Image: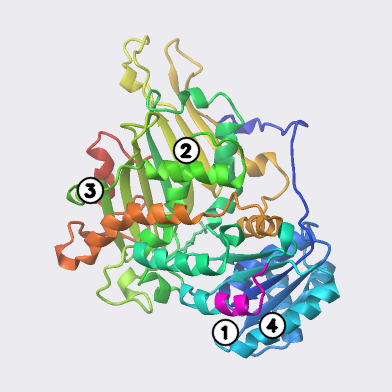
Amino acid sequence: MNFSQSVPQPSNNIHCAEEKPRACGMVIFGASGDLTFRKLLPSLFSLFANGYLPDNFFLLGFARTQMRDEDFRQRIKDKLSANVSEAGQALDKFVELCHYQADDYQDAQAYERLNHKLRQLSRRYDVQDNLLFYLSMPPSMYQPILEQLGQNGLLDEGGEQSPWRRVIFEKPFGHDLPSSRHLETVLASNLKEEQVYRIDHYLGKETVQNIMILRFANSVFEPLWNRRYIDHVQITVAEDIGIEHRAGYFDSTGLLRDMFQNHLLQIMALIAMEPPVSFAADHVRDEKVKLLNSVHPLNPGELPEQVVRGQYSEGRINGEPVPAYRQEEGVEPESMTETFAAMKLFIENWRWKGVPFYLRSGKRLAARASEAVIVFKEVPHSIFHPLESEDLQANTLKMRIQPQEGVCLGIQAKRPGPKLCLGNLNLSFRYEDVFQKAAIDAYARLLLDAMLGDQTLFLRSDNIDIAWQLLTPILEDWRQGRQSSLPLHFYAAGSETGPEAADNLLNIDQRSWLPYT
Ligand code: BG6
């Protein structure tokens, strides 16, 4: 039974606050690449079409591929008109704001040309020299680009932050703790922390932000949000896709770095952190760091009880046969790279002591679904003889991140019929049923926030560092190759839960993974 048939209506009591950013220009390094056309340009266009971009704005794409402004604009049009429904005239206006510079990232003179061009564009569009740079580049390019920008004065801010200069960085933030620390020294020697915007696009998802709203804009959950009432927490980020055409990146990265170091630990931090003093960037980020600092470090001797790694073998997704990971184009035939990981973590503080957090993520699982489930404790005593308390299903609060974004509270309820007739019932709400307005895309949210100077949904350097510290024992264990204490378990592509060992992680605690929907 599902109460969602009677769709709750949004009330008039809605508080929406969205500022419009001040005039600015944006420069994308790596402008001819996949991310630019797949995510950045559609997001910028949707901001433009919805009136969220500053009135005075321009975009400059910078990349090695030879193109003139007209070619760049045509590519944008071709790409966006195929995928964006509201294209039309707005798209013509949007591409007029787009410019392009074909140049070499390593050539010092390219940056003089860039500086010159930016001065011209800044005057033409009257953006008061406010500049947002987006580095859609491998981390090895950060240093040369930042140094050149710095030498040309393009990272200098004025007094009172006017003009402002900000730089957005894409993950991966290093490959491990030492490389991440090295990267941070590069950033710190060229920029102030207030100028650095490290993207974890999960934080830009409405439903991830809703974790904070649900917890801290309601009073019903907080009294229950602790070890007294919560049995355990499950976080799942499942994907049915494989590695697409990213073998070059993925085979040397693996799922732990790709998904856990950022997305899963961030979701866990939002679920478990203490209430921040306010929704201001550093208050939220302080609490997340404090929480991640409280995670009990993984002990090398105990890894087999807490961590599982897996890799998909061939199988079927939606009835179609798909190859094994090792047969994917560009993947080493003996690759040990994990496409699945699961782990059990404990948080050592008064709120969570003894409550396991089970996290899992994998490629080529049965479906695409990201969700976090709070599993409450069973009732302490059943008055419904002959039912025992363990016969009554424990309450669950499921936060659905995607797809079918929403929230679902599982409760026990009386069923029509005999006097003692009860069962599980889902009080569930889906964004798409309730709100006509489509959610603002994660990248659009984050680009807008960077223009607004709001770092709340971006990662701070100490956050990145602590996440790497947590994963280091696992990475070190895996580095030992055959001596590793964590075998690579295979699972058939299309399986719901990944390798059997991931089930055992919970079974040993008399628990099991809840199906994701
Ligand atoms: C990215 C990972 O950060 O997130 C990808 O690099 C993954 O491997 C993607 O597929 C998942 O994002 P989403 O928004 O589709 O859940």
* Tag 2 residue: 273
Q: Position of residue 467 (x, y in %)?
A: 40, 53
Where is mark 3, residue-wise? 299
Number of numbered markers: 4
Q: Is mark 3 within 8 Å of ligand 1?
A: no
Q: Which residue is at a point 42% across and 47% down the rendered structure image?
A: 236
Between the C-alphas of marks 1 and 2, the distance is 41 Å
Specify which label sits upstream in the sequence, 4 or 2.
Answer: 4
Question: In the rendering, at what x and y percent does residue 452 appear?
Answer: 71, 55
Please give the label number shown on residue 105: 1
Left or right of 270? Residue 429 is right
- Spatial separation of the CA atoms under disc 3 and disc 2: 23 Å
Secondary structure under the numbered disc 1 in the rendered image: loop
Cβ of disc 4 within 8 Å of ligand 1?
no
Residue type (three-letter) at the residue carrying disc 3: Asn
Query: Can residue 322 be spotted in the picture?
Result: yes
In the rendered view, does 406 fall on the left or right side of 450?
left
| Place of residue 248 in the rendered image (x, y in percent of width and height, measured from the top left) | 40, 76
**Distance in Å between CA atoms under marks 4 and 3:** 50 Å
